[in-house]
Amino acid sequence: MYRHLFVPLDDTDLSIETVGRSVEFARTLGARITFFHAQINYTASYQGDAEVVRITSPDDFTYTYEGRARELLTKAESAARAQGVPCDSMISTSNSPYKAILVAAKEAGCDLIYMASHGRRTYLGMMVGSQTLKVLMNSEIPVLVSATFNPPVSAQAIGIIRDEHRSLAAVLHAWNHLLETARTEGKGPDVGLMRAIVRYIRTFPLALHHPKEEEYLFRKLRERTSVTNAELDELQRQHQREHQLFEDTAAVLEKFAAGSAGLPELDEAVKQYTQFIWQHMGREEGVIMPAAQRHLLEEDWTEINAAFSGNNDPRFGGDTDAEFKRLFSRIVNLTPSN
């Protein structure tokens, strides 16, 4: 049986589903995963859109062409950790993704390449994408292709919610890892980076994600069934509790920055907050999402999907989504490597 999966990820929405499927598959096998992203070598040429973006908008270049890979892999690792699946990740710079996949899979010692297909038919009549087909035709390692077609609106909505959960999980992992590195190396953690983490959590999960869950997902589920009302009541109480727990943690950070709190106190506060979030997200994904899939109608999912598809809520401004992405990218790319 396969023990080590190699899972290539691209920068499309397909990767969200690929991560979920591969993690579940690895969990059933008792296998580990190495996630992989082939980064295009934009520095090899001074032609094209990449160079234009680099010159005209350095921040956009950093996010789009440099930080995106680390973001994709960090969220994938968070999804695996949530299911107890051991994982690692690799990045390679190459203008030939399929060759990079084959080389990296062999170097990692994987015994199965798990790939997704966009479902486009090739000249061989196979419903696989071009890079997937090239891997199939050239790999010495077994390849499993998970065919993915246009997902139903319910899957799209759940995919977005889970992806936002992974973003929060990745940021919390980064904070814990930052503190662990400081503790083991005897150095002070980056206060500026920790404040960026606080800003991200305060302005995205707390102020935007949770209210949307209550306003759309929770409300629609209450309209269709009463069997989850007690669980929804508890989750909403946890949202309120989370606000207080988070602000307490943020206050400890400021005390640490001022020298009136030590690293152990900050470390303990962050760990308590992190544990609370793990349990909360576990209840949502383990109880509420399955119930929603059973009871909600397509029209409900259409409304939920529309609400979560864009973070251009008037309360936050039209550039909110891009701002959060850049902030997330900065956090995961500046955090010391595992």
Image (spheres, helix red, strand yellow):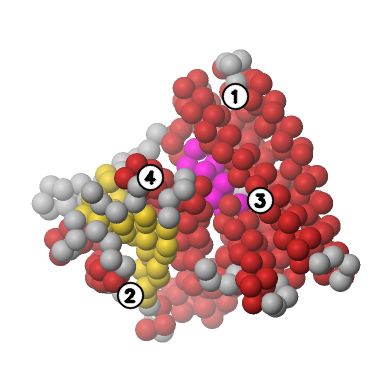
Q: Is residue 312 one of those drawn in magenta?
A: no
**Amino acid type shown at disc 4:** Arg
Expressed as whole percent of the image width and height from the top left, the position of residue 46 reads: 41, 84
Q: Residue at x 67, y 40 (%)?
A: 210
The Cα atoms of the two marked residues, 3 and 1, are separated by 28 Å
Image position of 279 with respect to 69: above or below: above
The Cα atoms of the two marked residues, 2 and 3, are separated by 36 Å
Q: Earlier in the sequence, mark 2 or mark 3?
A: 2
Q: Which residue is drawn at 80% across and 51% down?
A: 247
**Part of the protein shown in magenta:** 157-168
Dominant secondary structure (helix, strand or loop) of the stretch shown in magenta: helix
Residue tagged by mark 1? 220
In this view, the mark in front (3 or 1): 3
The Cα atoms of the two marked residues, 4 and 3, are separated by 23 Å
* Horizontal side, residue 234 vs residue 29: left or right: right
Q: Which of marks 2 and 1 is nearer the N terminus?
A: 2
